[in-house]
Amino acid sequence: MQQEKIWLSSPHMGGTEEKYVREAFETNWIAPLGPNVDGFEKDLCRYVGVKSTAAVVSGTAAIHLGLRLLGVEAGDEVICQSMTFVATANAIKYQGAIPTFMDSEAITWNLDPDLLHDHLSRRKAQGKRVAAVIPVHLYGMPAQMNEIRKICEEFEVPILEDAAEALGSFYNGKACGSLGDMAALSFNGNKIITTSGGGALLSNDEEKIKKARYLSTQARQAEVHFEHTEVGYNYRMSNISAGIGRGQMEVLSNRVLKKRAIHTFYTKELEAFRSIRFLKEPEGSLSNRWLSAFIIEKPTKKWNPEAIRLALDKENIESRPLWKPMHLQPVYKNAEYIGRGVSDSLFANGLCLPSDTKIDKGSLERIITIIKGI
């Protein structure tokens, strides 16, 4: 008999979500917008420490809106971290812009500041404009934002922070999502909190968020009839989804603690075992440990991430390779890439272990036993 499935990271309801959803039903606030949307946006502002937030249908929509509001136009160059989920890059293409993919550094697995400085220096010498930079906080680990911000300020390039995986992470005491000119969050079902699907665009520039809300409701003018002077999108979050989000915000701190406890268990049990190395927190960084990820520094034909993944899968346990970098994706085979091979190595030698906040100690011990038994 097959044992119960252990998921990588599945939705975890806290219990109060139903209250907010029931209120939406009882007051007939089912359609987009309503008290839950307003409340969820305020909850996010308080937690992240920004002035304004627009709740939208996905993290991808948030990145797309952010690019547009930062002035990115068709044909513009946008620097994008190569080691990321494809949504980061796709949003650039939605805007008709051109992604230049950039490698990670080995400390946080995020955007390499040295490569960024070199490239922006080269573009300045060429008299070419870079419209935006998108660093990603991979698996909840904050990027080297002090260095990235300093470089972007020097070359006057705005930062759109992809914090989709990093709600609950902090960098030098500031929440991820508050570290760029604008930031995107995701509330997909596998994230640390979920609205079943959804995202948010955050900024201290209240006028930009006001414009984001306008664009995300089909850019409808304030007229009795339907009046439109520019192209908009159907991107606004529904009042039902936002109700789930309000309940989830009440358990966010506990979810971070559980994710971090899972990571601590894995590192204690595995880090000294056969060249396994987990991603460590640099000084000043606190990761939500959305997924516990490691690399094998000395893989062999029988001892490698895929061998571990297959062994776990055989026992009904979900694990997953690290993100396949964008410069290795067929859809972006013709895009420019600037790198040193770090993200290629991470993808080849890395694995994400189950980090579901519903997981119990027995399941964690089962995972460890399987890995050590290979």
Image (cartoon, rainbow, N blue to C red):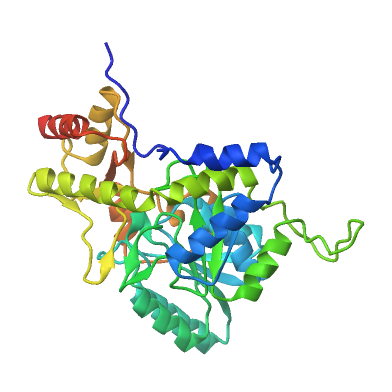
Q: Residue furthest top?
A: 1
Residue 212 placement (x, y as % from top left): 66, 65
Q: Nearer the viewer, residue 39 or 329?
A: 39
Residue 186 against residue 206 in the figure, above or below: above
- Residue at 34% x, 37% y is 8
Q: From the viewer's side, name the closer residue of 98 and 353.
A: 353
Residue 10 horizontal side relative to residue 287, left or right:
right
Q: Position of residue 235 (x, y in %)?
A: 67, 52
Residue at 72% x, 62% y: name it: 215
Image x and y of residue 203, in percent = 54, 71
Q: Is residue 313 left or right of residue 47?
A: left
Residue 258 vs residue 104, the one in the foreground: 258
Tell me if 367 is positioned left or right of 25 in this view: left
x 75%, y 59%: residue = 232
- Asked whether residue 331 appears in the rendered view, the answer is yes
Q: Quadrant of the C terminus?
A: top left
Quarter placement of the N terminus: top left
Q: Position of residue 286 (x, y in %)?
A: 28, 63
Asked whether residue 337 is in view, the answer is: no
